[in-house]
Amino acid sequence: MVLYPCCRFCPSSQTLRSHDGKGPQSRQEPGQGKGSFGRTPTTPTRRTSTSRSPAHTPAGGPDPGGARPRGGGDRRRRYGGVVVEVPRTRPEHMEDKKGTSGTPVSMVTNFCKVKTQTDRVLFQYQVEFSPDVDNRKARIAMVYSQEDLLGDTKIFDGKILFLPKKLENDKTVFTTERKTDGATITITITLTNEVPPTSPVCLQIYNILFRKFLKNIGMQRVNRSHHNPTQKIDMKAHGLEVWPGFVTSILQYEANVMLMADVSHKILRSDTVLSFMYELYGQVDPERFYEICSGKLVGEIALTRYNNKTYRIDGISWEEHPTDKFSLPDGTEISFVEYYEKQYNRKIQDNKQPLLLSRAKKKTKDGKVLILKLIPELCSLTGLSDEIRQNFSVMKDLASHTRLGPGDSSKAQQGFISQLNSNPDVQKEMKGWQIEFDQNLLQLDGRTLPAEKLFYFFAWFAFQFSYDRSAEWSREFRGKTLLSTRPLKDWLLIFTKRDAQIANDFKQTLEKVAGPIGIQVSNPVMVDIEDDQLGTYLRVMKEQVKAGVTQMVVCIVPNNRKDRYDAIKKFCCVDQPLPCQVIMSRTLSKKQMLMSVCTKIGLQMNCKMGGELWALEIPLPSLMVVGINMYPDSLTKGTSVGGFVASMNRNLTRWYSKCTIHKTGQELIDQLKHCLAASLRNYQTINQELPQRVIFYRDGVADWQLEALLKEELPQIVDTLKSHAEGYEPKITFVIVNKRINTRFFARDGSGLQNPPPGTVVDDEVTRPEWYDFFLVSTSVRQGTVTPCHYNVVWDTSGLKPDQMQKLTYKLCHLYYNWQGTIRVPAPCQYAHKLAFLVGQSVHTKPSEDLAQTLFYL
């Protein structure tokens, strides 16, 4: 039985635990250095990762399963994080996808052309080893050592070899000696393919090459972006580091292969995970340290400082330590301390720290789950904690480094291209492959659509952008009567006794602001409670809510405790369906802001009861617009929530909302069909006809998921529509909405650059030739660069021209009632997201059908 010291975080720092788990052996151990953690709890709670037949290895070390740090799906990984081959979805009738409406605007983008020889062919070879060589690095070394035969310009991944020149023979055989044992290895290289410049394989090669170029200029890959640690910005006062870098891809666009490079920043905590654990131990009850520490760290992303790779923390093994041993592939046993010193020249200082566990996405060859082990002392957490996000001073300082304006962004991108073009190693490699990058960023023309006219209470007002071009109309809207309102007669206001004055001020101010905008507000039933426990709020609601009478529940709470918020929402969405409003008392505590805050709350309450705020002209009659969005359920692993929201009237101001809760893609499709059928029935009830045109906006679909959507989800949705009623043949449009993109546009402003105005459309040059797609900038930002949204029309029998599709999409960005301005995506997409988010985060079950006709989730 091997004994080893218990980690200092263990409840008893005076205990040795046996490696076979048969129980503790006691001995006195003096506290050393940093590691004495105070009083000893009596009932420790062990937290270790459990899985069937785990295979263990240090993160970044020997990898028997070929596992990698967590990343995207398999297809994205195969192409180095870039999807270079996507299905063609451009309708056959769509010869010209460009619109013409709007004012021309000259812009610069974050793209540059990749110049290649159009008649250039690359050569693909299959490489075989006899006897077989298991170690991929050894295979690569053997092939790369053959410069006389293969030249110094090549790409080899262990199986497939790409060369810019053709070898003398289609099959080449040679031998080499394996360094580890002196064995003779026969290598056979066979020509399998000639790759033209238009092939997706060629794009794959360019992206692999580009990662090599980035390494040449000192950049290191972190997830799907590359950063330069030597240029890091130290924010010592806040304990943060900012690594500048870029997200890049090389793809085929309308007429050219182009490089896209977007400025990216990786934010790291300056301290290590180990120092975080020490600090936390000093702040919490030692009896709950295991539980609290696991809660803080599990799910976080850690970066290993010795190789700059990121891993998700899936568990903490409190009873394992750096002095423990593991087996190398050759059977040699070595401790983590020895391994990291030999492999990375890193000397571990604290031999009693626990190990972090990260479950690899891939399994080993024999099907075992691979558990990667990390040393807390050698890891830093990435991203921002909730505490940092809530610190205005830190976020302001951080924004000064990360939120670059159009001028600074384009300057950084131009400098990046110049650095590539001036690096000798990059130049040598590019010359061998006969490619080069244009010296300048791509310039193109877009169009800015005209401002929309909004109306309220049958009176039109012209919506014009203010001088700073912020597309919001709160000033024009102030004091105007809403399009339609619901009187608030029977409502319940619950608050704690210490918030009694705040509640009274809220009631009086709400009555004051509601009148001018057309909302009739009566006195509520006011209930003050002794404490702020969730059980107390639930008890009062159960006692006071009258089914079919009470219209709204408003709960004023002292803080943002999630369990209480979730319980209130679940009660009002499922148990006793009615709209509810949860307000933190500090939101109402600033009297100088109370009028403005109560106006916004009043608008939201009116929407939740079925009211409408404003509208704009929709030129298409008999139209239903549908928004679909997905969100992972925070309670049940592997379960997702789908939000489905469909318009019910001509002005697109009334919505029918349903949700799905599903595990697999087929479950989603089956439930979406039920949602669609229910929406059609409700539309017919309200309008006495079925919609003759249905337009879907589907959010949350990555490029690599597009093929599955086209083969599975879309055909069944189309079939559901056509089979809903005999002879029913609506015109159908299906649009993929992607807001997580790295494309940027900068409008020329004299000699400088600025963000393009809201309503700017780009439908050429940086769009894809196989798609009917366009970019739309629908908002303005006060800091940084504005992010456009990408729209890909993958199914279209509507007969609408590109101009009409683009204008309708922009109109829909005006109809989100939780913001008096335009938003990034069409309103039905955002409503679907809000619904899915509420259910996935708080309710965890389908809301009552009684609420489906209202925006209860705002």
Image (tube, grey):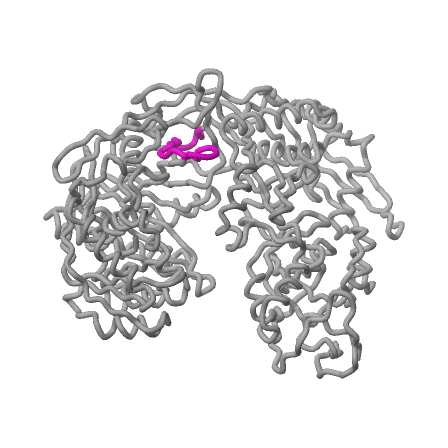
73, 288: nearer the viewer: 288
Left or right, residue 849 beside residue 484: right
Is residue 801 visible in the rendered image? The answer is: no
Q: Where 572 sits versus 650, above or below?
A: below
Question: In terms of image quadrants, where is residue 224?
Answer: top right
Q: Where 423 sits versus 175, above or below?
A: above
Q: Is residue 79 magenta?
A: no
Q: Position of residue 179 (x, y in %)?
A: 87, 48
Residue visible at 26% across and 73% down in the picture:
540
589, 450: nearer the viewer: 589
Q: Position of residue 166 (x, y in %)?
A: 71, 27
Q: Where 722 sits versus 557, above or below?
A: above
Residue visible at 29% across and 50% down in the picture:
594
* Magenta region: 767-788
* Magenta stretch: dominant secondary structure: loop
Q: Quadrant of the N terminus?
A: bottom right
Question: In terms of image quadrants, where is residue 371?
Answer: bottom right
Residue visible at 61% across and 42% down in the picture:
242
* Residue furthest top in the image: 750
* Residue furthest right in the image: 182
685, 560: nearer the viewer: 560
